[in-house]
Amino acid sequence: MAQIFPAGSNAVVRAVIVGGPLALCALVGSLYAIEWSPWATRQYAPISQPVPFSHKHHVGQLGIDCRYCHQGVEKSAYAGIPPTETCMTCHSQLYTDQAMLAPVRQSLAENRPIAWNKVHDLPDFVYFNHSIHVNKGMGCTSCHGRENQMQLVWQDQTLYMSWCLQCHRHPENFIADKSQAVNPQRVAAVDDPAKGATHEERITYARQLVKDYHILSSGVLTDCSTCHR
């Protein structure tokens, strides 16, 4: 009887049996890597703006408080974008002829807001309130990173739900004294050596802050309706 399959068929079958699962794993791994890469999350990519506003200069070097520009951060769901009049409080006297500030002067003259590009853009199905976080001891740096060191602002975290849940499940690992919420040098209580010589002492202090600030139990914080309304 003539041979049905060529001589190399066994080798091909072995390659498929071994290589198929490996190729599938490689595909899944590649998709996972892409999903968590800065290309997908938009992390660490400075966002260009109509005016190259430098947080490093204004906050890091001049020491301007976050709330001077973002006035709603302690009492509103939105931190707010400063109106042109806020910029011109200083720039009607300083650097009045700088070319880079032309859009600011034009905005004031035409009474038209500057079209800033959004950096932290949450999906429409996610509800986030700045004021509740700031007043519960979660500082600006927890989400925005060290903006006092950024020339142009970028997204410092993934903003994925799994990232949010890390804090909602264990707020004691991220909380600090709420008086330090807008401090660009803020350090979480568990990492602050001033709060105790040992990790156990610092975590005890952090857990006390959770109680003092009446932060809800993790079961409530991780309920779908907390963020998806």
Image (cartoon, rainbow, N blue to C red):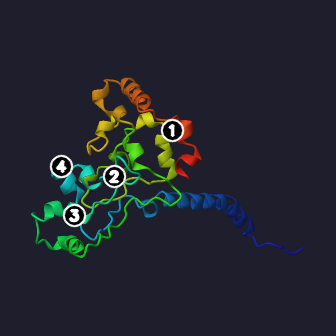
Q: Earlier in the sequence, mark 2 or mark 4?
A: 4
When asked about the image quadrant of residue 223, the answer is top right
Q: CA distance from mark 1 to mark 2?
A: 27 Å
Residue drawn at x 27%, y 71% is 50
- The answer to whether residue 184 is left or right of residue 19 is left
Give the residue displayed 29% in from the left and 49% down from the top: 146
Q: For the residue marked with disc 4, what is the amino acid?
A: Gly
Say if mark 3 contacts mark 2, CB within 8 Å: no
Between 181 and 173, the one lying in front of the other is 181
Question: Type of residue at label 2?
Answer: Gly
Q: Earlier in the sequence, mark 3 or mark 1?
A: 3
Q: Of the two numbered discs 1 and 2 on the same chain, state the one appearing first in sequence.
A: 2
Q: Position of residue 138 (x, y in %)?
A: 38, 41
**Circle 1 residue:** 169
Q: Choose the circle earlier in sequence order: 4 or 3.
A: 4
Q: Residue 85 — which label? A: 3
Closest to the camera, between mark 3 and mark 1, is: 3
| Residue under label 4 | 63
Question: Where is the N terminus found, in terms of image quarters?
Answer: bottom right
Quadrant of residue 172 within the rendered picture: top left
Residues at badges 1 and 4 in contact (C-beta under 8 Å)?
Answer: no
Q: Position of residue 144 (x, y in %)?
A: 35, 51
Alpha carbon distance from label 3 to label 2 = 16 Å
| Label 2 – label 4 distance at C-alpha | 19 Å
Q: Which mark is residue 72?
A: 2
In whole angstroms, how far apart are the C-alphas of marks 3 and 1? 41 Å
Mark 1 is surrounded, within 10 Å at the Cα level, by few (under 14), some (14 to 19) or many (20 or more) other residues, namely: some
Of 130 and 6, nearer the camera is 130
Q: Nearer the viewer, mark 1 or mark 4?
A: 4
Q: Residue at x 24, y 69 (%)?
A: 51
